[in-house]
Amino acid sequence: MPINPIFNPNGDDAIENRSIWFGNTTNLMQLNDVRFPWTVNLYQQMRENFWIPQRIDITQDVVDYANLTNDERYAYEGILAYLTFLDSIQTCNIPHLKSSVTAPEVSLCMAEQISQEGMHNQSYQYIIETIIPPERRNHVYEFWRTDKILKKRCEFIASLYQKYIDNPTSENYFVALMGDFLLEGLYFYNGFIYFYNLASRMLMSGSADIFKMINRDELSHVRLYQKLIPEARKIFTHSVDQIYDMFARAVEHECRWTNHIIGNNILGITESSTEQYTKYLANIRLRSIGLEPLYPETKYNKSPYTHLERFSDTKKEAHTKANFFESTVTSYVMSSGVTGWDEI
């Protein structure tokens, strides 16, 4: 895959000649006239999502953490470790994919995504350093080393990206791009549900508030890839079977990990509901890029966690209107100091 020069004085910025990949622009951010107008609204939404984790009070969570069951505490720490991995790897990976994007308005959205991924990692550190006792913190940071299931999970996800880094062909670029879509659209959400489940039982509500903010950011990332994947399918060599295979493996790995860290040990979450929810998410992500669901059974057309929507929907002091499960963000206002969201 070609890498954009820092400055291409021989480029042509005419709107009709712009493309997301393989274009020949000057690489200047001329945003007064863009070929992909959806980026303007999306970038504005991403910027208006700005928030700071330290403004969210999580002191009560210190008391709640001490009162969690052993299984709840194990899941809390393990999921934090997993989500830290996901946002860490995105912070490293997105710049590689962005370097081949030739539409400046798309590049701008990806730059904001990188910033948000870094801030999410700051949020995890804030949670760990505030809530987890000092003697347990290294255990959380090193969880991926000591837990074989999580280590395999991390290696599987990273391998899709590393293959492109090692061999930057257009075919491997498409696989890495699909890997990003799976990460943003599938991998976070069983973890989010766990924290919303605790909040529904009046536990760890501060942590849940932080994850609401992260959740909202991830919706904008999902929307970005919902736009990029259909465009990529027009350009890069691939097959529908390849996409379905990637989704099937992602669902398998996600269920295995979630059942390992949560299983049937947490009130309100079961291995059956995990399978239903993960396959439900896979179906709506496939529909969003113009493909038929992978799991046509009726039960996979609905979420088993609709009762938790009030903990995850993004509509309170920020007046951010979104359908959490369909990832359709419709309006944003400045959101600094936001502590939660209203029900729809």
Image (spheres, grey):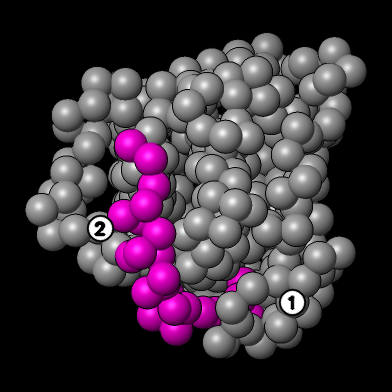
Q: Nearer the viewer, residue 204 or 214?
A: 204
Q: Which residue is mark 2?
A: 132
Q: Amino acid at mark 2?
A: Ile
Q: How many badges with numbers are in the image?
A: 2
Distance in Å between CA atoms under marks 2 and 1 = 29 Å
| Residue name at image x 38 percent, y 40 percent | 69
**Bounds of the magenta segment:** 46-70
Q: Is residue 60 magenta?
A: yes
Circles 2, 1 touching at the beta carbon (< 8 Å): no
Residue 130: x %, y % from top left = 27, 69
The answer to whether 105 appears left or right of 60 in the picture is: right
- Find disc 1 in the rendering and name its residue: 316
Q: Quadrant of residue 289?
A: top right
The answer to whether residue 195 is visible is: yes
Q: In the rendered view, would you say 96 is above or below 1?
A: below
**Residue 172 in sight in this render:** no
* The C terminus sits in image quarter: bottom right
Q: Earlier in the sequence, mark 2 or mark 1?
A: 2
Question: Quick one: 167 or 194, which is closer to the camera?
Answer: 194
Badge 1 amino acid: Lys
Residue 221 is situated, as x and y percent measured from the top left of the image, at: 60, 55
Examine the structure image and report whether residue 177 is included in the region drawn in magenta.
no
For the N terminus, the quadrant is top left
Who's the residue at 23% across and 46% down the image? 140
Q: Horizontally, is 125 left or right of 42 in the view? A: left
Q: Residue at x 79, y 43 (%)?
A: 306
